[in-house]
Image (cartoon, rainbow, N blue to C red):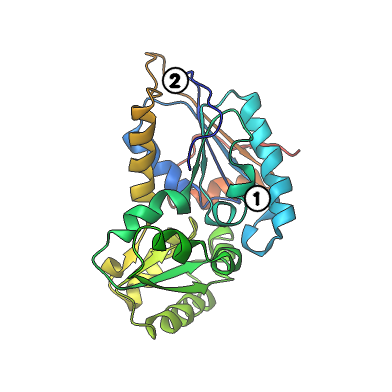
Amino acid sequence: MIISKNNNDSNSPIAFFDSGVGGLTVYNKVKKILPNENYVYYGDTLHVPYGEKSKEQLLEYSDSILKFFESKHCKAVVMACNTTSSVIYDDICGKYNFKLYPIVQSVAEILSTLPITRLGVFATSATINSQVYPREIAKYNNKIQVFGQHCPEWVNIVENNTLTDLDSIATVKEDLDKMLKNHPDKIVLGCTHYPFLLKILSKFASEDLFIDPAISFAQYIKDDLEKAGLLNSSNSKPAEEFYVSSEPEKFKIASKMFYNLKETPKLLNF
């Protein structure tokens, strides 16, 4: 499921892509447990949010980004975006010269082991409509009932850094109240932007109710790279590069909630 055609150079970088800052929730956790790796991150901020885009648009955007990662000789690419993992992973798997890690498919088996029967999923419209969470979890455990709910405003709340606005708080609470009517045992934050909203969510429900898949996903990536003999063996100082397709300064400001960028990202369009 995860392996595409491989670049077997263990010293090559690990790349991440997302529609914006959301992927930093995964990036931060991977970097903490793999501090010696080289990294490349691309935030497609010109086209955010991905959740409202068509499959054809997602394929077009992703192909340009993934070809860029090939030019950087990346050994692995993390699809730090639930929407692309849900909608286009099957179409792009095997096309590129690196290992490919889709977040939803990678964590589904882990979610299936939870001692629960009712699982809520907050996600974008595209992810919910794809039915990827119930489909992937059912491969391992068909006794978990999955309740999906799209949250159309949440990505923009994070990207625009309006988490403290009363309207934003009211929007998040309204979506949470709808989900709680399903009496979920746990709720997956099924978009990498959503952990930024935990401070709001935890005002109205126990923080233990929510699952950030990035934690399990990061460990999965480390274990798989180690198994493949692809962990960086170089003694050189690790490097990181950040690119965005629009508004680099805005990205840098919004990113501070999860990761402190040392430099402003480079602007790169295809």
- Provide residue 105's location: percent of width, then percent of height: 46, 51
Tag 1 residue: 45
Say which label, 1 or 2, has the lower sequence index: 2
Query: Residue at the spot x=45%, y=66% of the render?
Result: 134
Tag 2 residue: 10
Query: Residue at the spot x=66%, y=38% of the render?
Result: 65
Where is 148 relative to 263, above or below? below
Residue 208 lies left or right of residue 48; in this view the side is left
Looking at numbered disc 2 in the image, what kind of residue is underneath it?
Ser
Closer to us: mark 1 or mark 2?
A: 2
Query: Residue at the spot x=54%, y=72% of the render?
Result: 150
Q: Nearer the viewer, residue 252 or 207?
A: 207
Classify mark 2: residues with Cα within 10 Å, few (<14), some (14-19) or many (20+). many
> Residue extending furthest left?
115
Classify mark 1: residues with Cα within 10 Å, few (<14), some (14-19) or many (20+). many
Q: Is residue 259 visible?
A: no
| Distance from Cα at disc 1 to Cα at disc 2 | 29 Å
Question: For the residue labelled by badge 2, is the local secondary structure a helix, a strand or a loop?
Answer: loop
Looking at numbered disc 1 in the image, what kind of residue is underneath it?
Thr
Asked if the residues shown at circle 1 and circle 2 are in contact, with their CB atoms under 8 angstroms apart, the answer is no
